[in-house]
């Protein structure tokens, strides 16, 4: 009997219903008929490019194919130099950014704006190499600016006074106190602006209203008639483009948090009960601090959200969720799992560049890298509970089909481990099977005599070697 393994993350609040976990694996569904259409592949590893001063990354953005990151109190430009086919990376410190929390960033091709929510705004001009704080008093005349986007030549900022403001055309340092608007269809606060397909969307705490640029010499944006959607945003940094749409963490009036995607004329919920449960466990501060990211690689289109203890990732190409976690070690050498350390993903220099939540590292994510800055990646998948119509059963044989013999020369003989649970929560001792030495392609991974289960069983497969892993299928024999 084949055991489903590629349904992704679906861990119910009641474990007997579903205890599926998919950590540092992502489900892949092939478009053509073959041996196995659904399987699991390892998520990318991380390789360091440079390290800068600062305890963590606060924001990142690409402008004219050049990446910029904020670490600590500094704005950095990441430079690439290619000499005799050897690429070298350096950073340039462009200026000082106040605060310690995440920043909002936008660009118009020449000017890069960095906005500290409720604090200062800054402009870096790539043409003149000038870095300046926005000192125009009209910048704060309609409340403290919170988050920024760019559309049709204008920087657009939400404020804490239920208004949004726009800069002068292509001039991020110049603002007019009379150039403001409001989302008047509903009295909720404006949480974040977003631009999608040439329209400006103002996401409030309970509703979303769309605006369009009507031109003219006065304030350029006008609300689109009857375009008010009954969903709002709970986490301003969670709003992210991905898969030809945009997504965010939010909900409607008196609604628990979920993940929503724009569907043309409304929002479609893409989070499952398991994802909603994770979001519902967060306090208000942790919910508001969720940071979203997106990127595409090898046919997959990932949209992720960094929570406090885990990172949840949705693949728009398959409609399935998985988790990403990083391993860290305390001063005594004890390991702990934390949310994926990568944040503020930027695509530049033909790489998926990432800032680091835990240090001053700038690196890149790569599916052909099998560790995170030299540390192992713990990957595991837990199957849905297996039952026999409430009758007891035994599992005489379990076989995992993997990509055997794919180890690198440095990883002599990687191991895949199996443990079993009778309740979906407590698992027994792990038993390892070799995935074969380099080139040992016909190596099989079989576990015999797996015990008796009075009601249900969950299988957990784990892998942490610095080697390629593809879990193709799992079969079991029951008695």
Image (cartoon, rainbow, N blue to C red):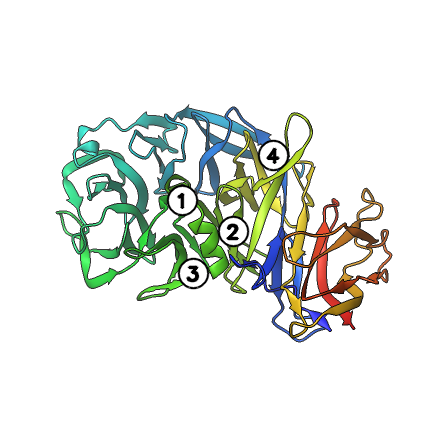
Judge whether residue 349 can be spotted in this image.
no
x and y percentages locating residue 404 in the rendered image = 80, 58
Please tell me whether mark 1 or mark 2 is closer to you in this view. 1
Spatial CA distance of label 1 from label 3 is 25 Å
Q: Tell me where residue 374 sits by quadrant.
A: top right
Label at residue 312: 2
Residue 456 seen anywhere in this rendered image of the structure:
yes
* Measured Cα–Cα span from mark 3 to mark 2: 19 Å
> Secondary structure beneath disc 4?
strand
Indicate left or right for 341 with 453 as reference: left
In the displayed structure, would residue 379 be above or below residue 135? below
Quick one: 251 or 316, which is closer to the camera?
A: 251
The residue beneath circle 3 is: 244
First in residue order: circle 4 vs circle 1: 4
Instruction: Give the CA separation, mark 1 to mark 2.
Output: 13 Å
Name the residue: 31% across, 41% down.
Answer: 148
Which residue in the structure is indicated by mark 4?
49
Name the residue at 51% across, 27% down.
55
- Residue named by callout 1: 287
> CA–CA distance between discs 3 and 4?
30 Å
């Amino acid at each position: 009997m084949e055991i489903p393994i590629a349904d992704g993350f679906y861990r119910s609040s009641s474990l007997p219903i579903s205890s599926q976990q998919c950590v540092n694996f992502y489900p892949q569904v092939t478009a053509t008929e073959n041996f196995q259409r659904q399987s699991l592949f390892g998520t990318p590893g991380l390789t360091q490019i440079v390290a800068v001063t600062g305890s963590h990354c606060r924001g990142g953005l690409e402008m004219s194919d050049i990446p910029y990151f904020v670490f600590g109190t500094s704005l950095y430009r990441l430079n690439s130099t290619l000499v005799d086919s050897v690429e070298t990376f350096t950073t340039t410190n462009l200026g000082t950014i106040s605060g310690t929390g995440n920043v909002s960033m936008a660009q118009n091709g020449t000017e890069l704006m960095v906005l500290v929510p409720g604090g200062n705004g800054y402009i870096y001009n790539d043409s003149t190499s000038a870095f300046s704080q926005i000192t125009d008093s009209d910048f704060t005349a309609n409340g403290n600016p919170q988050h920024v986007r760019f559309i049709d030549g204008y920087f657009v900022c939400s404020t804490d006074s239920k208004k949004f403001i726009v800069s002068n055309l292509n001039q991020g340092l110049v603002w007019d106190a009379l150039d403001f608007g409001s989302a008047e269809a509903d009295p909720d606060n404006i949480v974040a602006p977003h631009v999608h397909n040439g329209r400006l969307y103002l996401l409030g705490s309970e509703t979303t209203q769309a605006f369009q640029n009507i031109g003219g010499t006065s304030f350029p944006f006008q609300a689109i008639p009857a375009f008010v959607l009954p969903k709002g945003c709970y986490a301003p940094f969670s709003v992210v483009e991905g898969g030809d749409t945009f997504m965010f963490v939010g909900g409607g009036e008196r609604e628990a948090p979920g993940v929503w995607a724009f569907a043309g004329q409304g929002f479609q919920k893409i989070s499952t009960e398991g994802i909603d449960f994770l979001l519902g466990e967060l306090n208000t501060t942790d919910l508001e601090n969720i940071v979203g990211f997106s990127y595409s690689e090898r046919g997959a289109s990932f949209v992720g959200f960094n929570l406090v203890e885990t990172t949840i990732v949705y693949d728009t190409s398959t409609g399935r969720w998985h988790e990403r976690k990083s391993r860290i070690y305390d001063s005594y050498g004890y390991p702990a799992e934390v949310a994926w350390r990568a944040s503020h993903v930027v695509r530049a220099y033909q790489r998926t560049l990432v800032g680091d939540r835990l240090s001053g590292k700038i690196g890149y994510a790569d599916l052909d890298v099998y560790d995170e800055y030299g540390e192992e990646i713990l990957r595991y998948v837990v199957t849905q509970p297996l039952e026999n119509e409430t009758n007891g059963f035994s599992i005489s044989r379990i076989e995992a089909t993997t990509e055997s013999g794919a180890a690198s020369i440095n990883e002599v003989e990687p191991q895949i481990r199996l443990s079993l649970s009778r309740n979906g929560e407590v698992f027994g001792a792990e038993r390892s099977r070799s995935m074969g030495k380099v080139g040992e392609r016909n190596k099989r991974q079989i576990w015999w005599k797996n015990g008796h289960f009075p009601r249900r069983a969950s299988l957990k497969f784990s892998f942490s070697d610095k080697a390629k892993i593809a879990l193709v299928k799992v079969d079991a024999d029951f008695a």
